[in-house]
Image: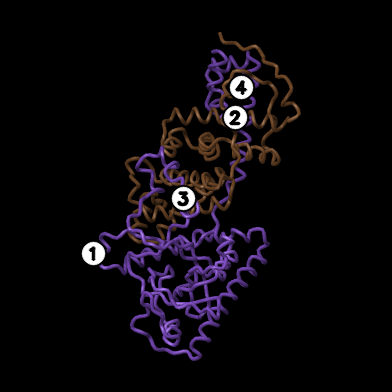
Amino acid sequence: MNCQSFDSIAADLARGVPADAAAREHANSCAPCAARLANERALTAGLRSLAEEARAAEAPARVEAALVAAFRAREWEKASAPADARATARPRPVNILGARARAASLGWLPRWAQGAAVAAASALLVFGLYGLVLKRSGVQTSDRAADTRPSAGTTAAPAERASSVDETTARDPRGTETTDGDPAADESAGVVTASVLPTPRAGRRAGAGRSFEARYGGARRAANANVPAGRAAADASHPQETAEITTDFIPLIHGGLVSADAGHVLRVELPRSALAGFGLPLNAERAGERVKADVLMGDDGIARAIRFVR
Amino acid sequence: MSAPKTPADEDLLRLALSGDEDAFTALYRRRQGGLYRFALQMSGSESVAEDVTQEVFMVLMRDACNFDPSRGTLSAYLYGVARNLTLRAFHKERALVRLDDEDEGAETDLNLVAQDDPLGDLTRSETVGRVRQAVLALPAHYREAVVLCELHEMSYAEAAEVLGCAVGTVRSRLHRGRALLIDRLRSTREPDNAAAPTLNTARCFA
């Protein structure tokens, strides 16, 4: 055996492959190759220490919670779909918890400060929403309109809109497709306009499940270029696309998504500057514009989560 | 009394696709740790690792029909998805420092020119950190071979299934990746000697 041959097996020897007699003899007689083998063994030991150090690392509990929630939502959607739609519809699980969206700009804060920041943002949002409701209606009503969806280009009367806010329309925290109608903006309030989303329909989605692609998409083809067809699941096509794209739901309270067994989704408009408060990127030149958002409201009236819509 | 048989990954997947939440949860808990560590060791980022882990199972829920059990195990499939997602995050985030491609040309010489100075003990905590950084600095196609074969103790065949390449390719990438690691660890250990002339010991090519 010569040094070149020994070089080709040194790594395997260091990784525990038994050495044959020729390899052992060469290692005993050739100092440089012996040194090479020693380095390979040191590297193997270092890599094993690295592996051992990381052995306890695992995904945080919120990932499991989000996946279970998405699984349940998917099963609910399948169960509520008409029989013929069930046969052809592709499930659209919801990626309702975005780790990066949540922690993008708050990660440098200590945990208590992160919670305080989120609580403050949610309090501002809640007060803004209820301030609008009180201003518009003055009196809560329990009447439920037959159709809560404002027509495109029209403006619902303030009283009707206020009563519709109380309606439970979307049990599914994902929300639904939205209308193209733009609710009348409350220019005087300057903060929020609201409309209630219609009842969710099976198979329809509002851009849910695209958070990873929204964050990392763009290199899809390059990443999958050498992957066999059977493995390219990460690049699965979605023929049934809707026009809206949403962020993940960002919880406004602890457990805001997991605990939302019931409630409704409120479509609001906020100043674009609100994006920064939730750790999302903001184009400063467009800070004065409005952005649509879906607020997940619990039956107790507490805003539990929010997502932004484009 | 015989111990209850642990259901295989494929059985759990089949049950999950029929609506069994416990089966889905069991499958997640069984595989999430390895996938998370793989993404973490590839990216060096906990947030990327978390996102990748979540998205792997979202993809599984959404596109489980793409998994063909005749082509390999579910574990390899999940790792393959995680690999694709991690690479996508690389392109977007550019979070890692990589060795320049020009370094690859020098590795051949390094393999033939023995440098006798030893690496020393790489098992101490302070040196494990250097090993971690050195792994993260590898080019992606070497890094994934090192991570799968060394840190996840996969065989060449298992790693080849994940990467979608031949066994020989995995072996070659692993060996080159290790050579790059040795060189990098040696240079970071003794930066003052980086410019010193290297004694090229005569080699036996007989």
Give the distance between the C-alpha atoms of the residues marked 2 and 1, in whole angstroms.
57 Å
| Residue B1 position in % (x across, y down) | 40, 53
Give the distance between the C-alpha atoms of the residues marked 4 and 2, in whole angstroms.
9 Å
Secondary structure beneath label 4: helix
Q: Quadrant of residue A89?
A: bottom left
- Answer above or below: position of A38 versus A70: above
**What amino acid is labelled 4 in the image?**
Leu
Give the distance between the C-alpha atoms of the residues marked 4 and 1, in whole angstroms.
65 Å
Chain containing mark 2: B
Q: Nearer the viewer, mark 4 or mark 3?
A: 3
- Crowding around mark 2 (Cα neighbors within 10 Å: few <14, some 14 to 19, many 20+) is many
Residue beneath the point at 57% across and 21% down: B108
Residue beneath the point at 34% across and 65% down: A204
**What amino acid is labelled 3 in the image?**
Gly
- Crowding around mark 3 (Cα neighbors within 10 Å: few <14, some 14 to 19, many 20+) is some
Would you say B133 lies left or right of B11 here?
A: right
| Disc 3 target residue | A217
Q: Nearer the viewer, mark 2 or mark 3?
A: 3
| Disc 2 target residue | B180
Would you say B94 lies left or right of A95 here?
A: right
Secondary structure beneath label 2: helix
Give the distance between the C-alpha atoms of the residues marked 2 and 3, in whole angstroms.
30 Å
In depth, the one of A153 and B106 nearer the eye is A153
Would you say B4 lies left or right of A11 here?
A: left
- Answer above or below: position of A279 versus A178: above
- Kindly indicate which chain is depicted in brown in the rendered structure: B
* Res A84 label: 1
- Crowding around mark 1 (Cα neighbors within 10 Å: few <14, some 14 to 19, many 20+) is few
| Disc 4 target residue | B110
- Kindly indicate which chain is depicted in purple in the rendered structure: A
Residue beneath the point at 69% across and 38% down: B127
Secondary structure beneath label 1: helix
